[in-house]
Amino acid sequence: MERSYVIKPLLNEAYPMISHGKGIYLYDTDGKAYIDASSGAVTASIGHGISEVIEAMNEQANQVSFVYRSQFTSKAVEDLAFELNKLIDADEDYHTFFVNSGSEATETAMKIAIQHFQEKGQHQKNKVISRWTSYHGITLGALSLSGHKKRRERFVPLLHDYPVAPPPSCYRCPFNESFPGCQLKCADELNVVIEKMGAEHIAAFIAEPIIGAAGGAIVPPRGYYERIKEICEKHEILLIADEVMTGLGRTGEALGMDHWKVKPDILALGKGLSAGYTPLAATMCSESVLEPIKNGSNFIMSGHTFSANPQSAATALAVLYYLKKHGLVQKSKTNGAYLKRQLKTLFNQFDFIGDVRGLGMMVGIEFVRNRASKDPFPSPTFLTNKLVKKAQENGLLIYPASTARPQGDGDAVIIAPPLISTKEEVDQIVELLKKTLKEIQ
Ligand code: PLP
């Protein structure tokens, strides 16, 4: 192509053009194959070119692709919300507000939380609080709550808020303690923060069950979310789980929070919901969160033109059926544990690997200049960029991430292959990564 008019992430860089995808592979127009070991942006969770999904998309397109949600509902959105409610498997029902991106899903969650208290007459309870080392989206409300220095710093004048709670990172404990001796100080700090700010001003606390892009697959310690839930309940604060990356089987459970058996009051889904076949995201809330709104204004003050798009809903429904039919949540657990074990073997070969962590098919690797001091490489993200680029040259796609360093620097990557990946494919991923690490060593 002579000249491109598309604004791409790196403006001066030429990007390969993809011609097609099949299973865990993408192929460019020069015929080069890439193993999609990042599922794009941890999105293509059932892989590419799945015929059942394509058939469902065609079938819906032949009926109707778009209806406006203020005028109509459709069978596709009704069926999808029904299936999602089953997936949560809670004592009370969960209702779904469909949007188009993870950022919109977390912003909608914030709005529902604030509106919930407004309709109960608690107008002062209007703040949503969050943690450092987090990413909830790029739009301004979601970015305000995101503890990700690089993504925030240029736009601070536009942001209404900043995170207040510490991340539950055992590898880089904000209190320099270790589990279990720490007695979950990182969770208890939320209580301290709430008491300082005044619970009467706080509507909700938002957290990623397993920290993704901002931390490189950080798994909180045992008991962390149970404690967080207790603290939220004590102060009548809603718990929002940002499951945009962790939801729909990515971590080996239907939802990331299932690892702690905690039901959030509100949750955000995206990415794996439509597995990248169409843009779709969702905010779900429990019946009890919705009730005051139903009994009050009877209207959630949010929405987008493309919300509850039947084409996307039919696609996501086919993705969900595919997940169930092929037992992909369980497969993510089993093959994800295998992936982590295999990646841990690299620890012995490369002394710049500081930590290997994660759950299911969401495994993070953090790189350090010195394993004992955990110091990062001097040029932040230099190593990650070099590694991700070199891996792509070698036909392997991996996802760059930040770390829990308070300075906002450090290098990590997430390996998050489609949940359909077999053990043999996991072996191929690990071999290609090993080759790449040797080359950049
Ligand atoms: N929340 C989490 C946990 C994410 O990982 C992301 C994206 O990476 C988002 C929200 C934002 O989603 P989107 O890029 O679809 O707006």
Image: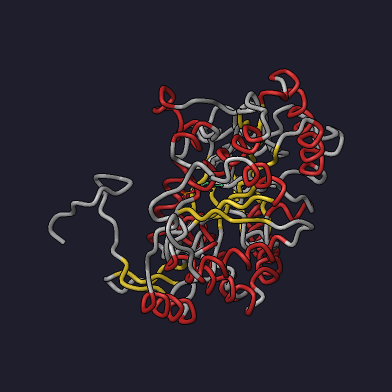
Residue sitting nearer the eye, 67 or 143: 67
The answer to whether residue 435 is left or right of residue 233 is: left
Q: Is residue 286 above or below residue 430?
A: above
Q: Is residue 32 above or below residue 109?
A: below
The picture places residue 423, in percent across and down from the top left corner, at: 63, 74
- Residue 3 can be seen in this image: yes
The picture places residue 425, in percent across and down from the top left corner, at: 56, 73
Point 70% across, 47% down: residue: 219
The picture places residue 420, in percent across and down from the top left corner, at: 58, 73
- Residue 22 can be seen in this image: no
Residue sitting nearer the eye, 56 or 124: 124
Point 76% across, 35% down: residue: 232
Residue sitting nearer the eye, 255 or 76: 76
Q: Is residue 349 above or below residue 181?
A: below
Residue at the outermost top position: 196
Point 42% across, 75% down: residue: 60
Q: Quadrant of the N terminus?
A: bottom left
Q: Quadrant of residue 10?
A: top left
The picture places residue 296, in percent across and down from the top left corner, at: 62, 40
How many marks overall? 0
Point 49% across, 34% down: residue: 141
